[in-house]
Image (cartoon, rainbow, N blue to C red):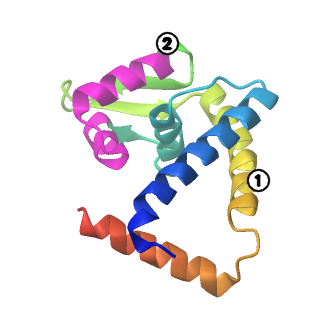
Amino acid sequence: MDINSSISLLSHIHSITADFLIEKLKEKGLPDFASSHGNILFQLSRFPKISMKELAEKINRDKSTTTVLVRKLEAEGFVKTFSSDSDKRTKFITLTEKGSQYNKLTKEISQSLNKTFYKGFTEQEKETFVSLLEKINKNFS
């Protein structure tokens, strides 16, 4: 095992999982969004109403990039934006029914991805793996 190849291996896994997702989205007749679009829809399944600023933090993008991503999703009918009653400068984002349906279908795809991803892993190995990834993530925070 070459420990210096771990980043290359992570990059390869990222690429093949993205290909897996694109193929499954096609099979379901769903649009092929950029991963950031999918992440926004996922975050909105976790936080039904979120400010643009909070969303930008959650998807690790600046506010202007997040705004562009959200505008595309809004134009496609997946999200709705509205201003805060108390501060018109603050924008909130919520899922539409179309966005909720997208998330239901992608949840099934995600379960299929996880089943493939963790094939042959024990529960302890899964927990250890996630713990190590969290540690790496924290190292860059």
Circle 2 residue: 75
For the residues labelled 2 and 1, the Cα–Cα distance comes to 29 Å
Principal secondary structure, stretch drawn in magenta: helix
Residue segment shown in magenta: 52-74
- Packing grade of label 1 (10 A; few <14, some 14-19, many >=20) is some
On whether residue 69 falls in the magenta region, the answer is yes
Horizontal arrangement in the rendering, residue 121 relative to residue 81 (left or right): right
Vertically, is 117 above or below 17? Answer: below
Horizontal arrangement in the rendering, residue 48 relative to residue 104 (left or right): left
Image coords of residue 17 (percent x, y): 62, 47
Q: Nearer the viewer, residue 22 or 105?
A: 22
Q: Nearer the viewer, residue 10 or 42?
A: 10
Residue extending furthest bottom?
124
Three-letter amino acid code of the residue under disc 1: Ser
Q: Residue 32: which quarter of the image? A: top right
**In the rendering, which numbered label is found on residue 56?**
none
Vertically, is 29 above or below 60? Answer: above
Circle 1 residue: 112
Looking at the rendered structure, the secondary structure element under dot 1 is helix
On whether residue 41 falls in the magenta region, the answer is no
Q: Residue at x 56, y 44 (%)?
A: 15
Q: Residue 77: which quarter of the image? A: top right
Q: Residue at x 52, y 76 (%)?
A: 1
Looking at the rendered structure, the secondary structure element under dot 2 is helix
Image coords of residue 37 (percent x, y): 48, 31
